[in-house]
Amino acid sequence: MATMSFSIPDDVKDRFNKAFADANKSAVVTKLMLDALDQIDHKRRSDKAVRRILNRHAKNKGPYISTEEILRTRDQIRAESDSAHGIRRK
């Protein structure tokens, strides 16, 4: 097992020691570090996915459809479906 040394503000050290007085502090710090590493990995994967989506979007030469048009179409489909099923909405 390795040993690491960090400099932290005294108030953070005091709060940490108080909050985890009865805990294995090495285990707590290890868990916090693993959580931070997981968050970094998740962010990297998310950023990569966003870049892929944006690249696909940039390459797409299809017609632009506005949000309003999408919502109108959605409402029309819902109305047709409701009508077919005898549902009335106010």
Image: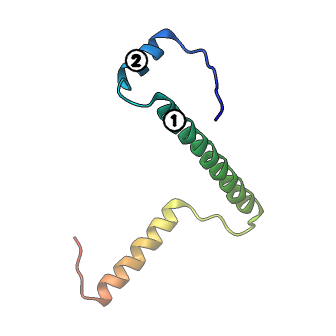
State whether residue 38 is above or below residue 83. above
Residue at 43% across / 21% down in the picture?
16
Quick one: label 2 or label 1, which is nearer the N terminus? 2
Corner quadrant of residue 72: bottom left
Q: Position of residue 51 (x, y in %)?
A: 71, 53
Label 1 residue SS: helix
The residue at which mark 2 appears reads as: 15
The image quadrant where one finds the C terminus is bottom left
Q: Position of residue 45 (x, y in %)?
A: 65, 52
Q: Amino acid at mark 2?
A: Arg
Q: Is residue 86 left or right of residue 69?
A: left
State whether residue 28 is above or below residue 50. above
Q: Which mark is residue 32?
A: 1
Q: Residue 28 or 54: which is nearer the viewer?
A: 28
Q: How many marks?
A: 2
Q: CA distance from mark 2 to mark 1?
A: 15 Å
Q: Residue 33 or 26: which is nearer the viewer?
A: 26
